[in-house]
Image: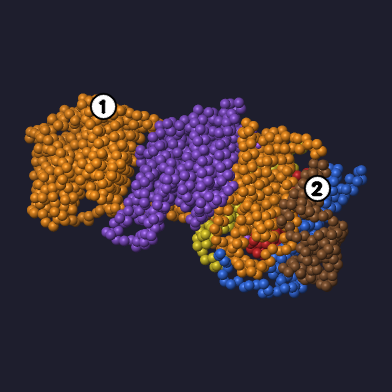
Amino acid sequence: MIGFYTVMEGVIAFFLIAGGVFAFIGSFGLARLKDFFMRLHGPSKTSTLGVGCVLIASMCYFSLIEGSLSLQGMLITIFLFITAPVSAHLLAKSALHYKLARDPRTLDDIEELKDGEDDEKPNGENGHLP
Amino acid sequence: MNHLIVMPILVPLIAGLALLLNRDGSATPRRIVGLTATALLVAVCAMLVFQSTDDTIRYYALGDWQPPFGIILVLDRLSAMMVMLTAVLAFGSLLFASAGGDEEGSNFQGLFQLQLMGINGAFLTGDLFNLFVFFEVLLIASYSLLMHGGGKARIHSGFHYVALNLAGSALFLIGVGVLYGALGTLNMADMAARVAELDGDRRVLVEAGALLLLVVFALKAAMLPLYFWLPRAYASAPAPVAALFAIMTKVGVYAIIRVFTLIFGPQAGSLAGLAQPWVWWLALATLALGGVGVLSARDLRTQAAYLIVLSVGTLLAGVGMNSTAANAALLYYLMHTTLVTGGLFLLAETISIQRGKAGARIVRGRAVHQIALLGGLFLLAAMTVAGVPPFSGAIGKALLLQSASPAQQPWLWPILLISSLAAIVALSRTGSTLFWRASSSEKNTDKHEKNPEREQADKGEKPEKGRKEAVSAGPLRIAGLLVLLGASPVLMLFAGPLTEFTHATAEQLADHEAYIQAILVRDSMGDGS
Amino acid sequence: MIPTQRWLPMPLLSLLLLAMWLLLQQSVSLGQILLGSLLALVIPLITQPFWERQPMLKHPWLLVRYIFRVLGDIIIANLQVSKLILDPRGRMSPAFIEYPLELTEMLPITILASSITLTPGTVSVNLRKDRRTLVIHALNTGDREDTIAQIRERYERPLKEIFEC
Amino acid sequence: MLDNALWISVALFTVSIMLNLYRVAVGPALPDRILALDTMYVNSIALIVLFGIWLNTKTYFEAALLIAMLGFISTVAVCKYLLRGDIIE
Amino acid sequence: MSLLLIVLLPLLGSLVPLMGSNERRNACATMTAVAPTIALGIALAYMGQVLDGDIPRAAVSWIPALGLELAMRLDGLSLLFVLLILGIGLLIILYTRFYLADGDDMPRFYAFLMLFMTSMLGIVMADNLLLLWVFWELTSLSSFLLIGYWYRQSEARKGARMALTVTGAGGLALLAGLLLIGQIVGSYDMQVVLDSRELIQQDPRYLPALLLVLLGAFTKSAQVPFQFWLPHAMAAPTPVSAFLHSATMVKAGVFLLARMHPALAGSEAWLYLVGLTGLVTLLYGAYFALLKHDLKGILAFSTVSHLGIITLLFGLDSRLAVVAGLFHIVNHACFKAALFMTAGIVDHECGTRDIRKLKGLWRFMPLTTTMAVLAGAAMAGVPLFNGFLSKEMMLAESLQTPLLGGLSWLIPALATVGSLLSVAYSLRLVRNVFFDGPARDLPRTPHEPPRLMLAPVMLLTVICVVVGLLPALTMTALLEAAASAALAGDSPELHLAIWHGVNPALLMSLTALLGGLLLYLQRRHVFAFQRQFRPRDARLLFEMGIQLGVRIAQRAIDSLENGSLQRYMLWLVIAVLCVAGSALTQTSGLQGPLENQPLDGLLIAGAIIAMFAGLATAIMHRRRLISLLMLSIVGLMTSLAFARFSAPDLALTQLAVEVVNMILLMLALFFLPQKTPQESGAPRILRDVLLAAGFGGIVASLNYAVLTRPLESISDFYLENSVPGGGGHNVVNVILVDFRGFDTLGEITVLCIAAIGIYKLLNRLRLFMPSSDADGRPWALDHHPAILGTVAQTILPLALLVSFFIFLRGHNAPGGGFIAGLITAAALLLLYIARGVDWTQQRAPIQFQPIAVAGVGVATLTGVGSFVFGQPFLTSAYGHFHIPLIGDIELATAILFDLGVYLTVVGSTLMMLANLGKMTTRHRPSKNKEQA
Amino acid sequence: MEALYAMTTGILAASGLFLALRGRTFPVVVGLTLLSYAVNLFLFSMGGLQAGAAAVIDDSGNYTDPLPQALVLTAIVIGFAMTAFSVILAMRARADLGSDHVNGNRVDESREERS
Ligand code: NA
Ligand code: NA
């Protein structure tokens, strides 16, 4: 049994550290990469996985100390994996709308980024009273 | 089990909820419900006052959790008097509102009831944090009522009122927090008991917390320099709301009295009478500035608002004197000023409606239709708020002056008297302009030069002569006016028993031990059952 | 698979809810199962009006296989992205890719877009209003057509199969 | 071993959050800041879970669940704001 | 008791005329006269008793706490005045019947008159100092109404206000003075006070009290320098002037001197103050009476002068002078009332009161002329008339005065000058109006007035003559009685007679008569002399003064209350800094006995992030959205802090509130400018930074001081009783729904009201809707991103499940109705965001207000339910039930209460946000809609 | 730790107050919200700061003071309601008064937005 615990501890420790590392890489990418669209990749993948790892570690840990499967963490993971891509999607959509600057290497010949596509030039009056 | 004590909260709460459940449809059933509930409230409060006169301090342990652990409502003479006062004021205001104006926006009747719930809760509660909660209830209801009907002035002054009170709420929480952090309890009687046994260093903390509370209460009470929000807010509020608001500043005054006579009574040692020196000087300044404000007012509503400031100064000066006689005097004055200034707002509205374009502004304008009625009521109101005898205002003023010693408190007499004079001068000017100057141009248009603006107004009016009926104050409005302004002669006639009551109230306030005993010592007779 | 009825509009959702309930409660007692079933029955009924018309889920087991495939890809994706991020020289060739969709129903499109975001080097950045084109940002792409084909093969086809549309 | 792993993980997440804060602060564009904020939410989920492991309690599980759900809603709301101005239309 | 009737009857009588009608004038007048007649009868019935030296009293308790009793006395002084007031009052009623024009509102006039009469009677009969003040103020007020009777005239309004202001101010001074006396003596009972002369005059408060009382008396009786209001009170109808300036109002002032004489007189201060004031007034009034051209103006200044005489008499330190004063009061009342009424008749008949236009009226109205001559002679102090007697007494007493020491000869000299002037103006009044050649250019041809209108004048003139001829017979008893009251003891022996032999007083009188005649003849020199001075209109000055006062007040208020929230907020902060600072400076140090707990990196990082975000919220506030993002970081850190320090419920709540709050703020931000313009200058910023730093410092200091001190709190009770007493393991939740459930009830009420208030605010709101964002970028065209919609619909059922879970477990683990409600609301909001209002509302047309209200209702009714079991409001009950197959279930009323909370939260939150969304959607520019 | 905590509360309170002294409605509302966070943290800490002692009765026997937590919960809810009301009021003020200045001063909107 002691062997099992040690193994499990190792597994938990692995997931903990892996989670931390992934999250760090994600955030590092967020801080370091050149343009918004590149920065988007880090958090949307690595951070999500990082947290996923920690949740797995947590599930293992509590299953271990409670002696029965403790899968509540699954819920968070599910939530996270449903929501994270959508957040990223909407953020990207906003960025496209803002026509944020791209890294010069980017191939960006899509219509969303063409100038004057859906622009109506602001016509002096900035607002509208019903 | 004596459930009566909780009724001043439950009756308006349940009535309010019932009214809010259905916000559409005819106004009449809502008015009936609102008026019935308020009448019931008056009856309940009258019974409470009657109960309180046996000098027993009763409490009601909510959820059956005994103090200091649970929240309690405390019925003593002071709280009974305050809820009674609220009920009467509310009844008068609601009568007036029910004549129309409550349909300008939605939910007026329901919010009105919840406002009452908040006010009554603040008066009854024996728990400091619960006081905060009820403050918030009455504030949020007042915000909504203040905006009733909309309009620029309301929105503008409303934002000031809201923002300042939000800051005030934050301070309240800090104050309560510090007091809890130093005393470890929230029940006010328990706090009073614990303050007595406090060591030196924590005394300072308690002092800081308590003084923060003083700032909050002063903001609510509209004490200088924290009253500036009041004149515009009250002047722009819908009349019945402004009338009901006459009690709001008194909630602040009440809170100062309650907290600083109970918790920081003589048992508090070096902390005893903590607030009174601050209150005293600022009250005098408030009083003086209130007088200046009354004189400066350009319209009757603003004038009424400054009269509230003036009355707050007067009341707080009474608080600052911190004696039984002064407390007794100020409580009588409080009854008078609450009802009469409330009535004055209603009157201002009635006058303003009848004067058409000139409204409540103190300028020449169209004459009022019901000059005898309104003029008479204005005279009554003006006399009583300016402290001209024989009405209640003069009695209250004389009582307060009498309780002050010109040797020890040399400033009260001159300031109070000069402010009264300012009120007399200002109100006679107002009355003569509103009622006298107006008619002259109306009747002698041939003789006098015509004021072009007036003329236009006249022309505008002519086709609407038939409107006179609609403009005249109907029976409900008059009833509302009579309930509030008529209070003055009633307070005058029954000044004997009433001052006896307030004196007993002041004595009860001074008797801390009895209060603490009644609440903290179990199987005492004050368990409310 | 499970016949749709008036009182059980979304059987799979109900199942998911029951499972979630038991996960939350960490208990499989009879009481919890009954309560969970009740919720699994009631909640879909309440929320039904807010659901857009759903494509029928024809092959649930394919869905399970799909999920595992995506999970695997996620891990690979992370390693790849990590490498790119940590690459001190920052050699990348980012690109926007217009991906012509074959799917037409929203649920599978959403799943596809999410999968793309979670998996190697790509983030779906815009679903155009006509719902025919999905714009994708790739962190490091050699050939756009290649990426499109890969996505089509690995994700869109299976999804089409699962939802049979 | 577990303790050390836990602390390493906590440290990494803490640093991550600080990096997120950096991005929130410098931007440059609004989407950058929002992205960083969203990541901060996600990282704090992990921190709460780690905290639970440290204290050996599941009391904070719901907090993590809530951040996952509500953080998403905030991000969506801000994005909608950037795109349309009006969040609920 | 019938004593009280003397006062109360006229009061009731003031209601009588209101029942009459303006058309039936005789009836109205008659009805009005009934009450005073009865009152006069009662007074006369007491007369014998009073003259015998008795002082009948009657008292009804009123306000013991104030020492105010409804107590009346009828001593000689009172009786004298009562007779004057009622007698002349009745005559005025009669006279008024004919005086008022058809257009004038007679009932109103009579009502005011009777009110005035009551208050005068109250003053003279009051047996209690405060009661005296009550009636005193009432005379000011009722005279205000009477003077303003013809309120269409500007002069009337202003005159009325001036009178009220001056006498009102005096009244307040009087109140202060009387209260001081009350404090000295310890009672307001008149007799006690009058008997306490020694006590009063030895008290240091005597002088202020005296000054204040005299201030009251002098303002009322128009003594210099407060004389100016009186001539302007002439705007009143003549009967009012006749009444106010002969028998009543102004006499109240001198009555007060007489009344308080026993208690206050006799000191140096009294002597100088009263005596000199009287003397100055006497001269001042007489001089200006000579100069006036208006009939009533002459009479008004003459009144001032005669009041000066009376005051002087009370100021002379002699008992006989007091008697003379009292005597002069009566005499003056009679001839002055007669003269005023005559003036009214002249005005009435000729249409003018200008003495320069009037002439030779004797031809038209011989009877009136006769009366005027006789009354005028009395006023001038011609022998054989009553005025002569009292004036001679005055002159005689002035010789005795110790006033001014070595210069005391000045007093009789000046008194003589005053008398001389008085002769001159009387002569001018009578001769210029009624004689002086034939009348010319009168607006109207005068006739003799109706007999009944003249009757009061005749009666009064007869009295003047009879008293003048038979002074001892008519007046001695009454005067002695009055004097014994005013002197608190026996009256000096009176020898009222026409002839006292040749004495200095007689010589002075003769000098006055002859000098007066001479002066009258040479009066043009006086007019010429006066012309050097610019005439000043007291009314104008007064008005200007008031206007100036008002303007100053307005400027002060406007500068103080400039309508600036920042200013008001500043005051609030200053108040906090002052009070908290004053407390904190007393402490020796913030550090308490407890040591700091160790720090770790996580804590430091958290604190840094929170502080950074907080500061950034403030610093970047001009870019509003960024500021908002920073705020949400603070929110996140706050909830993490709650989690870190063992408050899972708080962490959950803070998180849930945070998101809803963010959505709300962003919704609102859309309709507000996206950026804040740079407005504050550097000094303002610096000021605010310093204030904020001070405030933050105080908060931090308090926080630290509390944190480092141990606490003995009541909380152990909750920890111990939560499970056995409240049936829940989550103590925080048990506190919320049970121990302090009442707070929670209040809290959800607040939430519900806020939602309803917001609903009200959104009513008929005209929104300003930007068609592009802050950078001028048009909005994206994709209203509802499709992927978001799909995810939102997926999350909704999951969220509902989670929220149900959180709700159920709340009692035993972190959670509860509030958090559950917010989760539900947030999930629904997500749906609104993703799908829009129209789509959502269409599919589920839910009214949120009833839900919110019902929530509070459920909570309330749960509380009320305990009444059934005879328990207090909100008493909880719980029990464990065993159900076969399922096992133990715990049911608690607290759950029901929590359900109320849940419903309120869901209803309120959605009511706020969905309504806002709904209304914006309605108004969104159609341009975008078409393209959608 | 206590010192750091107190410092954080102080700085948050100061920042909130600074904003509350601004001249536009939105910063004022944001400032008051920030202030309420600070106050909640303050009030919360009145029962002492302790980790791992949540007041959920179990067999640990180590509990933090639950009362301030309950108070803060109430305060959070009330604060939310108040913020909500004030922010909508700010909107209403902008709509009615034509300016988002706290004192309702009329300003040139378009110029303001461009600057
Ligand atoms: Na909208
Ligand atoms: Na309970």
User: x, y percentage for residue B438?
Assistant: 34, 54
> The numbered mark 1 sits on a residue in which chain?
E
Q: Which chain is orange?
A: E
Q: Is residue E906 left or right of residue C161?
A: left
> The numbered mark 2 sits on a residue in which chain?
C
Q: Quadrant of the N terminus of chain C?
A: bottom right
Q: Which chain is brown?
A: C
Give amino acid for label 2.
Leu
Considering every residue shown, the one lying at the far front of the view is: C6
Label ID, residue C23:
2
Chain A painted colour: blue
User: x, y percentage for residue F16?
Assistant: 60, 53
User: x, y percentage for residue C118?
Assistant: 80, 61
Ligand 1: quadrant of the figure: bottom right
Tag 1 secondary structure: loop
Q: Which chain is red?
A: D
Q: Is residue B259 left or right of residue E35?
A: right
| Picture quadrant where residue F47 is located | top right
| Picture quadrant where residue E531 is located | bottom left
